[in-house]
Image (cartoon, rainbow, N blue to C red):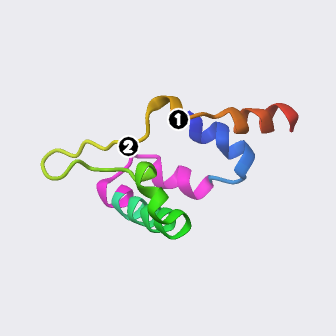
Amino acid sequence: MELWWIAGLLGDLDKTGRALRQGMHGSYFSAHLSKLKKILRRELGPAAEPYLISDAGSGPRRYSLGLRPVAVSYDALRQQVVLG
């Protein structure tokens, strides 16, 4: 749901919508996760660590962030929507 809410701010998501219409396949997620990690490391350097999605090693994949829940907020995006 958040994807479509954010899409109003970021523009067209047709390509993403088509790719995810039948659900998210592991290869799609892995490729995008790898790209995201590379960008975060390049832009944030050592400060990127809490923002990197971790897969907790082998076995069934369970993904998580090192961020505490109180560190995640949509306030800036909400203000953009309200202020237009």
Q: For the point 54% across and 35% down, which residue is it?
A: 72
The residue lying at 31 percent from left, 50 percent from top is: 54
Report the amino acid beneath label 2.
Answer: Gly
Q: Dot 1 lies on which element?
A: helix
Read off the magenta span: 14-29
Residue 12 in percent (x, y) is at 69, 54
Q: Quadrant of residue 2?
A: top right
Give the numbered dot on residue 83: none
Which three-letter amino acid code belongs to the residue tagged 1? Ala
Which residue is most to the right? 83
| Residue ID for mark 1 | 71
Quarter of the image containing the N terminus? top right
Depicted 1 relative to depicted 65: above or below: above
Between 77 and 13, which is closer to the camera in this rendering?
Answer: 77
Q: CA distance from mark 1 to mark 2?
A: 10 Å
Question: Element at badge 2?
Answer: loop
Q: Position of residue 52 (x, y in %)?
A: 41, 53
Whole-percent x and y of residue 27? Answer: 32, 61
Label 2 crowd bin: few (<14), some (14–19), many (20+), radius 10 Å: few
Q: Position of residue 64 (x, y in %)?
A: 34, 42
- Residue 73 versus residue 32: which sits nearer the camera? 73
Query: Residue 67 is drawn in which quadrant?
Result: top left
* Label 2 sits on residue: 66
Q: What secondary structure characterizes most of the magenta part?
A: helix
Q: Is residue 21 above or below residue 30?
A: above
Q: In the picture, which quadrant includes the C terminus?
A: top right
Left or right position of 24 against 3? left
Q: How many marks?
A: 2
In the image, taking residue 68 as reference, residue 80 lies left or right, namely right
- Asked whether disc 1 touches disc 2, contact meaning CB atoms under 8 Å apart, the reply is no
Dot 1: within a 10 Å radius of its alpha carbon, few (fewer than 14), some, or many (20 or more) residues?
A: few
* Residue 15 inside the magenta-drawn segment: yes
